Amino acid sequence: MASEAIKLEQDGGVARITMARPEKHNAFDDFLISDLSEMFEATGADDSVRVVILQGEGKSFSAGADLGWMQRMADYSEVENLADARKLAAMVRSLNELPKPTIARVQGAAFGGGVGLVAACDIALASQAASFCLSEARLGLIPSVISPFVVEAIGARAARRYFQTAERFDADEAHILGLVHEVVPRERLDHRIDELVELLLANGPNAMAASKGLIRRVASGPVDDAMTEDTARRIADIRATEEGREGVRAFLEKREPSWRMTTKS
């Protein structure tokens, strides 16, 4: 069962997962990692959930690793350190592969592993007050388990700079790098997220989940006979589903499909 460090609110088809350690800037420890893993698994398996929003309570989105946790890890054996790292890696991967659209609501600072959470979400929106830092090198460490997601988001070239300088950069730079999709004034952050949620609720839930798998497949390349055959099979399979048939029928009959939801009254 999740602790008080995590809050889950569900309204209609939207689940909001809030990291609730504002006094620690929502920094990770082993307990928060376990709680997040549990929440991602639960919302991923819940058919009533159509969109997942990940956010942090207070001034920061997430400051990465908690200092107390790091102090404990300093006394861990190699075996214990590896087990701990595997849990963090599995948590971020579960977010990346969650079969629902995910939105990172970045209102403040995202450091270290917090940047990994942003990169693992499908959509990331930042307020103009947000800031980012891959700070591990300052501690003699590396952003290892988050690196697949961060490098995918910002590219190897930018990673070569920011993994090594550990410099802080603002929301506009994060947008240029591709880490976040949009930067908006803080007072408009929730409004803009609500607009995106409405778009997502209008779409076929199975189609969106299948799109995530499709992206992972085609991003690995190359465009060869196997790729061509795989993409052909994917569209053929989804056309044959009830959701696919309903979507085409609704379009032809000029009506809303049965799956469409809205947060608007």
Image (cartoon, rainbow, N blue to C red):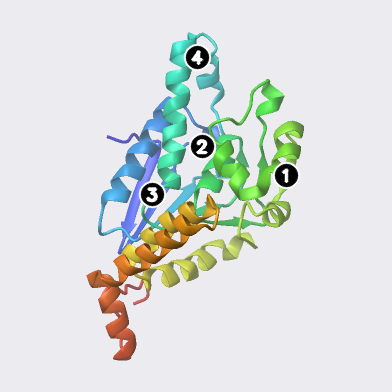
Q: Amino acid at mark 4?
A: Arg
Q: Position of residue 5 (x, y in %)?
A: 40, 36
Which secondary structure lies at badge 4? helix
Q: What distance separates the C-alpha of mark 2 from that of mark 3?
A: 21 Å
Q: Nearer the viewer, mark 4 or mark 1?
A: 1
Sequence-first disc among 4 and 3: 4
Image position of 186 with respect to 256: above or below: above
Which residue is denoted by mark 2 in the rendering? 26
Which residue is denoted by mark 3 in the rendering? 98
Which residue is denoted by mark 4 in the rendering? 72
Quarter assignment of residue 180? bottom right
Sequence-first disc among 2 and 1: 2
Image position of 216 with respect to 191: above or below: above
Foreground of the two, 201 or 203: 203
Q: Residues within 10 Å of mark 2 (few under 14, many from 20)?
A: many
Sequence-first disc among 2 and 3: 2
Which secondary structure lies at badge 2? loop
Q: Is residue 233 left or right of residue 27?
A: left
Which secondary structure lies at badge 3? loop
Sequence-first disc among 3 and 1: 3
Q: Amino acid at mark 3?
A: Leu
Which residue is denoted by mark 1 in the rendering? 158
Q: Residues within 10 Å of mark 1 (few under 14, many from 20)?
A: few
Q: Nearer the viewer, mark 2 or mark 4?
A: 4
Which secondary structure lies at badge 1? helix
Q: Which mark is residue 22?
A: none
On-image quarter of the C terminus: bottom left
Q: What distance separates the C-alpha of mark 4 from that of mark 3?
A: 30 Å
